[in-house]
Image (cartoon, rainbow, N blue to C red):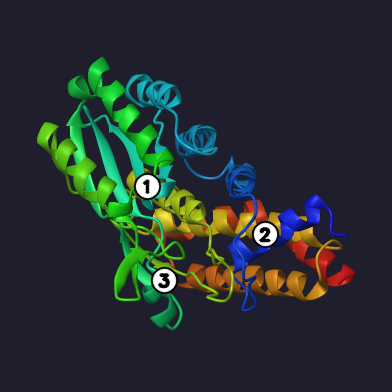
Amino acid sequence: MATDEILQLEALFRHLVLPPKLPRDCDSDNVALDRSLGERLQNALAIYHDVGDTRVWRTLEASLQTTGNLNQGPLYQDDLVKAFQLVKDSDCSVWLGLHVVLQNAALIVHRDHATSSVILEEFQTAAPVSDVLKTDHALTWDFPSRAVAVSLSDFSNESFLGNLSRFLEQASSQAFDRFAARASKGGQSIVEIRDCPSPALISEMLMSLLEGLGSPVHVRRLRKRVRDDVVLDTSEIPWRRSPYWLVLRVTLGRILSTLLGDAHEAMGRVYYKFIMCAVLANLLRDCVGKLHPEMTLMLQAKLCRRLAKLESEKMSASGPLSAAYNDFFAASSGTFGTIVADARHRV
């Protein structure tokens, strides 16, 4: 019988690698899976602490830690109020990634010191099943879908923080038929539980209310190729790639593009890609000797392809970007090489 550790590693492998063969049923413990995904992303930062701007790593560590603490099941009002106060009061930059699970939506919340405001960014976390099934490889999405700036004085209002936190607590713990996916059966419209709901409660209602208090704002948007898969079989709820993993990646990308984008538009992408390589390398290290060799080889191949692509990009980079590639490779090549060599030896 598979141990809990092996089952967890297998689940992580599926969500991080997205192999061709996937289970029919959804994961049995999404909370534990999401916690593990968040912890692995945090752990991936450690190898790069001496690379580049230390302010970036402090912000990432604080933001991912706070985000992980909040997203352990439904969002709770008291926890949200404390986190919002941290965003507005903290001297160091702290970003929040809030996964409103039952509304298929997420919010990124962060302070803009230059304008004395707090920015709230919204995006959808999972595509409709029909969109996933008809795409050949990946969907192309822009993040965020919508962003609003609220003045720091308004955001600091105790009543506002309480109402916003209460709204998010209810939205994360209660599904509404009005926003559910629908299917036709016997000439009647019924709720389709195998599909994801509309994010309109957050994307339309909440964001419009926030616009009434603040104003729409332009932020540097991320364009991502979002890979997912659906196995529509006999299971009541089909397997889907973790929406929380998308929340984490978008939050990470937005932090990096905001903190580093002014210096060089592509710098945030370099940081992001090397962090993702560290996530894969650490998983490969933990999987060797525990998962099926085919899975280990697939993970090893994915890591090596990514590293080869970064090596190719380094050759065409110049100036600060070239220096960043060199620094990241210097910090990680020894560790990654050891992990890959050990995997090849033991598989």
Nearer to me, 165 or 9: 165
- Number of residues whose C-alpha sits closer than 10 Å to that of mark 2, classed few (under 14), some (14–19) or many (20 or more): some
The C terminus - image quarter:
bottom right
Q: Quadrant of residue 226?
A: bottom left
Q: Give the alpha-carbon distance from disc 3 to disc 1, as whole Å.
A: 19 Å
| Residue 8 position (above or below residue 153) | below
- Number of residues whose C-alpha sits closer than 10 Å to that of mark 3, classed few (under 14), some (14–19) or many (20 or more): some
Nearer to me, 339 or 2: 2
User: Which residue is identified by label 1?
Assistant: 106
- Measured as percent of width and height from the top left, residue 130 is found at 38, 75
In front: label 3 or label 1: 3
Residue that lies at the very extreme toward the top in this rendered image: 158
Numbered label attached to residue 330: none
User: Which residue is identified by label 3?
Assistant: 129
Q: Give the alpha-carbon distance from disc 1 to disc 2, as whole Å.
A: 22 Å
User: Which residue is identified by label 2?
Assistant: 11
The N terminus - image quarter:
bottom right
Q: Amino acid at mark 2?
A: Ala
The answer to whether any part of residue 135 appears in the image is no
Q: Residue at the location (55% across, 74% down)?
A: 231
Q: Residue at the location (34% across, 63% down)?
A: 181
Q: Earlier in the sequence, mark 3 or mark 1?
A: 1
The answer to whether any part of residue 247 appears in the image is yes
Q: Earlier in the sequence, mark 1 or mark 2?
A: 2
Q: Secondary structure at mark 1?
A: strand
Q: Amino acid at mark 1?
A: Ala
Nearer to me, 35 or 327: 35
227 relative position to 338: left or right = left
Q: Amino acid at mark 3?
A: Val
Q: Give the alpha-carbon distance from disc 2 to disc 3, as whole Å.
A: 21 Å
Q: Quadrant of residue 83?
A: top left
Q: Secondary structure at mark 2?
A: helix
